[in-house]
Image (cartoon, grey):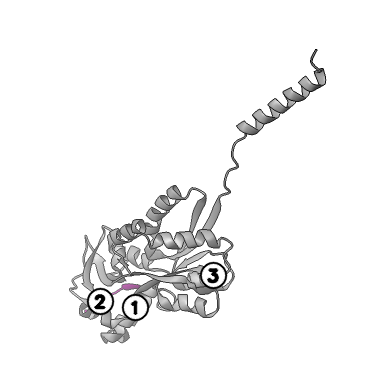
């Protein structure tokens, strides 16, 4: 007769082995990456987010969209950001010089162009930048030059064309380039100076002229990982993805120049 104790132990072991074999594999914990990015990147980044999260389901992208200068100030004040995408070199370099972004974790990602636009349905009678000083032009929208790169480039262009002194009293300064675009779309201003890429996401404005690249600083979008990031591995993965084929196609779709 078999030992009942031995039989009981055998049954126990079988149950334990069965439980182990049916135990579900441990799920990978989701990592949230906070990306502070210039307003002009909004639509492209939304599309990139869908593709990236599909390929990397353990990473969730959280976007903080705004003017590059304002985003820089948030980072200076300790905002928990993993990656910064600026629409200009200056605010980005300030963070690098303060040691907040390491040089080995940054890249010049994109380029853009500056354009003069007017409302498509009710266009102002202008054919170029020189027409902005005509008497019937009462309001022109640009980003705040001190904190919005597109606004800084716009001011530089107007200064180099000898127009800023005359136009400054009628310039409406906006918190970011998209607000300048909105003012033109709604007819609240006669014209605006925005990025070429902004026109790609609006069917309510038309381009009057493209600014000569010699009239303003080079428009470069740098991207970099914050030294304080708690998710360096995932941030490096996303920065690499932004330089890959899929992201390149999306950026070009929205009118950006992808830099090598």
Q: Verify CB contact (< 8 Å) between mark 2 and mark 3.
A: no
Q: Residue at the location (27% across, 70% down)?
A: 191
Residue 12 visible: yes
Image check: 252 left or right of 50? left
Any mark on residue 153, and which? Answer: 1
Q: Quadrant of residue 181?
A: bottom left
User: Residue 62's x, y, as percent?
Assistant: 50, 56
Most frequent secondary structure within the magenta stretch: loop
Q: CA distance from mark 2 to mark 3?
A: 31 Å
Q: Quadrant of the N terminus?
A: top right
Q: Position of residue 163 (x, y in %)?
A: 27, 84
Q: Are marks 2 and 1 in contact (CB under 8 Å)?
A: yes
Viewer-proximal residue among 21 and 5: 5
Q: Which mark is residue 74?
A: 3
Q: Badge 1 local density, few (<14 within 10 Å), some, or many (20+)?
A: many
At x 37%, y 60%, the residue is: 244
Secondary structure of the residue carrying numbered label 2? loop
Query: What residue would you read off at disc 2?
Result: 211
């Amino acid at each position: 007769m078999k030992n009942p104790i031995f039989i009981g132990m055998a049954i126990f072991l079988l149950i334990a082995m069965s439980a182990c074999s049916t135990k579900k594999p441990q799920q990978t914990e989701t990592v949230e990456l906070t990306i502070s990015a210039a307003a002009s990147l909004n639509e492209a980044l939304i599309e990139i987010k869908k593709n990236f999260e599909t390929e990397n389901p353990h990473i969730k992208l959280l976007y903080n969209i705004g003017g590059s200068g304002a985003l820089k100030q948030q980072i200076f004040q300790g905002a928990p950001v993993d990656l910064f995408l600026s629409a200009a070199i200056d605010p980005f370099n300030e963070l690098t010089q303060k040691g907040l972004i390491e040089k080995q974790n940054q890249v010049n990602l994109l380029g853009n162009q500056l354009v003069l636009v007017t409302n498509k349905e009710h266009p102002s009678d202008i054919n170029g930048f020189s027409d902005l000083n005509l008497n019937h032009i009462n309001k022109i929208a640009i980003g705040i030059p001190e904190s919005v790169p597109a606004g800084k480039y716009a001011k530089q262009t107007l200064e180099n064309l000898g127009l800023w002194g005359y136009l400054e009293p009628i310039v409406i300064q906006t918190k970011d380039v998209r607000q300048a675009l909105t003012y033109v779309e709604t007819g609240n201003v006669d014209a605006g100076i925005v990025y070429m890429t902004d026109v790609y996401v609006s069917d309510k404005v038309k381009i009057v002229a493209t600014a000569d690249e010699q009239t303003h600083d080079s428009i470069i979008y740098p991207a970099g990982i914050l030294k304080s990031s708690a998710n360096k591995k995932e941030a490096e993965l996303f920065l690499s993805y932004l330089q890959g084929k899929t992201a390149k196609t999306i950026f070009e779709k929205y009118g950006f120049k992808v830099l090598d």
